[in-house]
Amino acid sequence: MHSGDLSQKNTLYKEGLLPKNFQIAGFAHSKSSVEAIRKLVDPYVVNTLRDEHEKQLYKEFWKIVTYNSGDSQSDKDLAPVTDIVNKFETGKKKGHRLVYFALPAYLFAKTAAAVKTTLYSKTGWTRLVIEKPFGKDSESSKELSDALSLIWTEKEIYRIDHYLGKEMVQNILALRFGNRQLEPTWNNEHIANVEVLFKEPFGTMGRGVYFDEYGMIRDVVQNHLLQVLALIAMERPEANDAEKIRDEKLYLLKHMKDLAMEDIVLGQYVGNPKGVGDATKGYTEDDTVKDKNSTTATYSLVTLHIDNDRWRGVPFFIRSGKATDESRVEVRVQYKPLAEDLFNGQAKRDMTIIRIQPNEAVYQRLNIKRPGMSNELIETELDLTYATRFYNAYLPDAYERLLLDVFNGEQANFVRTDELSEAWRVFTPALHTIEKDKKMPVKYVFGAQSFKEADDLEAKYGLIRENN
């Protein structure tokens, strides 16, 4: 449990979305108290409270929070939490329990076993929510999944990937299968390439210990961004049902080829002499990065290939980087050029772009005649920006949405074991080769938009960068 988690739970409480008779029993290794935790949470919440009613709700929220510390793998240390929960449930017909792990992966199995022994509900459901990392490769992921499956069923395990709770990621299936316009052209006959783009304008910011062990591909590509790609490329499910949706994602991943080394470009940022503050420091100058000769990549471009009738021959790029020029996460679908051009080469390629963050939007780039007497073609956009079209609409935080899914037993937005296995299968051989070779990534300057080696790989597969 940490301050971000509690601030999201408070929002659910404030909006009346949590179940009635709800209790939060926090547990961690470090000694603390509810009062100390509240001091950490207050800065996230206090300034967002709109009136006296919300201030009162916030005070009431803390009455349902308790905290204990100890070894999460110990039945004895978990006993006080069990006592609190049992006392709370006394006199109630059913006691449902949601157990949320924010733990290092090496603690998952033994902690899950201890929780099953001490905190498993005898009168209602018990659901286990697990944060990534779900292993480091196929072998470690299988070992973890096998250990969990001995004591918890697939229906009880919720592997949470917060990208699957983001508004525009949740909109992908609605856009594709709720309209007739896109789907007839959503194939290799019309689409030239697909790019999933992830850019952050900051470096590792003190996360060097974690990041140097996992790197860019494990941090966001193999999980968050691959999940986005799967929703973009999957076939239409038979029903809007959790298992049917996850079946189609699995089918898509099974047809994805292993990532090849020639389809990867890796980068590592260096300080920008013209930068300010952290921008002047390179990755290995982060005090928390202990290996000053580290070959860990902070930028990666991978090209994935799907061997099925819909997508054969279409390259899928996942481009992700820290310390770039901006914050942006989006999907960019670039169409093929016109088969017959009436306009003497003026037409640029159509694009459909789904901006996941910031400023959620869907827009299409297309060609029109320049207004007035001219017959010249110009490129413009059909722009559905949420902040403009849905003014003042409340877009819930990804974790808020996913926590409600757990309460409701809805697993469509959580990663199933077989799906996780296929995701690791795609990346594991390349990851092992990268770790064995220990080649130094291409250096790029903090704040760069891109760099030549990454652009060249996309250009090799036909991506035309006509605009940003």
Image (tube, rainbow, N blue to C red):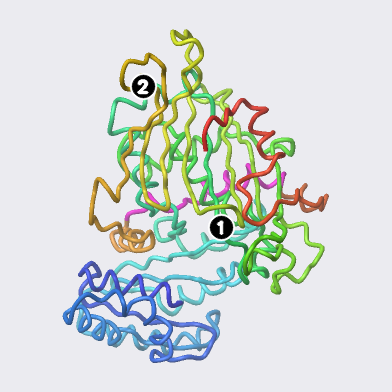
Q: Quadrant of residue 134?
A: bottom right
Q: Is residue 173 above or below residue 219?
A: above
Tell us which disc is closer to us: 1 or 2. 2
The percent coordinates of residue 102 (x first, y second) are 50, 71
Q: Is residue 276 above or below residue 119?
A: above
Mainly helix, strand or loop, the magenta region? helix
> In screen coordinates, is 92 left or right of 310?
left
What span is in magenta?
410-430
Instruction: Specify the label residue 340 is tagged with.
Output: none
Sequence order check: which comes first, mark 1 or mark 2? 1
Which residue is rendered at x = 58% and y = 61% of the image?
202
Q: Secondary structure at mark 2?
A: loop
Which residue is rendered at x = 30% and y = 85% of the image?
62
Q: Which residue is mark 2?
A: 370
The percent coordinates of residue 293 (x first, y second) are 82, 63
> In screen coordinates, is 199 left or right of 268?
left
Q: Which residue is mark 1?
A: 201
**Magenta segment: does it hold 412?**
yes
Foreground pick, 438 / 138: 438
Which residue is rendered at x = 62% and y = 54% of the image?
447
Q: Amino acid at mark 2?
A: Arg
